[in-house]
Amino acid sequence: MQQLDKYKDNDLTEVKQLGLWASIAGLGYIFWLVGGMEIIERLAYYGVKATAGIYASDPVSKGGLGITMTDYGVIMFIFALTQTTVPIVTGGLSDRLGYKETIALSTLVKIGAYLIMAFFPSFLGFTLGAMTLAFGTGIFKPGIQGTMVKAVPRESTTMAWGIFYQLVNIGGFLGPLVAVQLRQLSWDHLFFACAAIISLNFLFLLMYTEPDKQERLARKQAVKAGELKQQALWKESLREIRKPLVFGYMFAFSGFWFMFNAMFDVLPVHIKEWVDTSTIVTDLFGAGGTQNPFWIGLLGLNHEGTRVMPDFLMSVNSVMIATCCFLVAAGTAKFRIMSSMLAGALFCTGAMLVVGFTPGAWFMIIAIMVFSLGEMLLSPKKGEFMGNIAPADKKAMYLGFVMLPQGIGWTLEGFIAPWLYDMFASKDRLSRDYLGELGMATDRIQGIPQGEAFDRLVSFANTTPELMTQTLYQANNIGLAWYIIATVGAISAVGIYIYAKMVFRIQKAAN
């Protein structure tokens, strides 16, 4: 039994879950309130996040930053490092200062982030805006999720996390829907709109009541009176991180989050450059597309109604989760948490292979759907797992620890995945290479603004964009970057399996 002492503060028991309707009925107004706040926050967040790669790679002549994917990777590296480090450091701060206070602070910071992006349309300006947005998001998450953990009965956690994740993805669907239309007007329209949207959370805060607030205040008073000793927050965090359960979780899931974030950071650019989404519109509406504003808005089409915008195609992920996540949560309520997460990692790995295999538009939708199923099996469970094993007075701290593997995986991916894409699949880089093969002088190629090389190639070769895209795709191994990313996911799945065996062993010994 001595070997279990290091887990004595952590509750590893798997509580029997209530049925679908009993679980939903047990969720109080605080749960739905924070769910509404999460929708608003995600709407604004994904309005920018889903389009960031497109904004970065679009030429300056079209209002973009006109930078390479490698340079974009630098921004994503900083963004990921900031967003995933902050909750690890400040997650416990919400437990001590109050959830309402930290949520309000994060909202102010995020408003500032969107305004920076709007007023400073440059590499440095967008980097600073991204860092500020990441900092605000890192403060926001522990307070929101800590509130939810305290407000939800233990026997309803599987359904609660599934529905919460569903609400998150309603915002994830609406964000790109808004972004697609606004960015076609101008990019600053999008950034100003996101600042206005996130400010709506102040209305929700007027109705917010922190669960177990009296307990937190009593603990704070006991510490102040010297009745209870409280370690420095960084020391407490370090002590918990060093536990094998937390440390092992960090390494097992890092590879998955590398693969997961590549889907959202790089795939929209891949679709923009290599996937002919007009085939979807043609199959649905005929050769002329549609001029119906309802369908143009709902399906995220360009203003001409002839093709699906790449950032909106990613919303297939959010639509699936927003409509199906509670069903998946109900279906997996009887499964072990770790088994569900392992299955999710395998599905997402398969989706990466499909993306690399073909540029077909409908195949992209299939890949995103398979990926979404994997995400529903894994991602809601991470919060449930950490929320369950966390000591009673460290719920927000442990939910901050959820960001540990995300921090490692996403930070590495933030730079490596865009760099891989730049090396093997960048349309601009491959177009410059082909222009050289066709005889264009090197100085002329170097003088082409970033992001405009493909248009110059089409003109120089006197062909159509569609034919030239096919030529470049067939002449290069575009899918290699995605196969490498899938390999990282497969290795992570092995790590999750090993970690699951460890957790099962501990649970068995504790019983």
Image (spheres, rainbow, N blue to C red):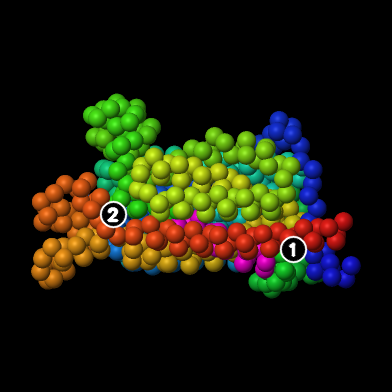
Residue 393 quadrant: bottom right
Picture coordinates of residue 133, whole percent (x, y): 45, 57
Asked if residue 254 is positioned above or below residue 42 in the image, the reply reads below
Question: Dominant secondary structure of the magenta stretch?
Answer: helix
Asked whether disc 2 touches disc 1, contact meaning CB atoms under 8 Å apart, the reply is no
Task: Report the residue marked by disc 2.
Answer: 473
Q: Which mark is residue 46?
A: none
Q: Is residue 261 magenta?
A: yes
Task: Look at 20% across and 56% down and name the residue there.
Answer: 454
Task: Look at 20% across and 51% down and name the residue there.
Answer: 468
Picture coordinates of residue 230, whole percent (x, y): 75, 69
Quadrant of image for the C terminus: bottom right
Amino acid type assigned to the residue bearing label 2 in the image: Tyr
State which region is magenta: 247-262
Q: Secondary structure at mark 1?
A: helix
Task: Look at 48% across and 67% down and name the residue there.
Answer: 412
Task: Report the residue marked by disc 1.
Answer: 502
Picture coordinates of residue 91, whole percent (x, y): 62, 61
Picture coordinates of residue 134, whole percent (x, y): 47, 59
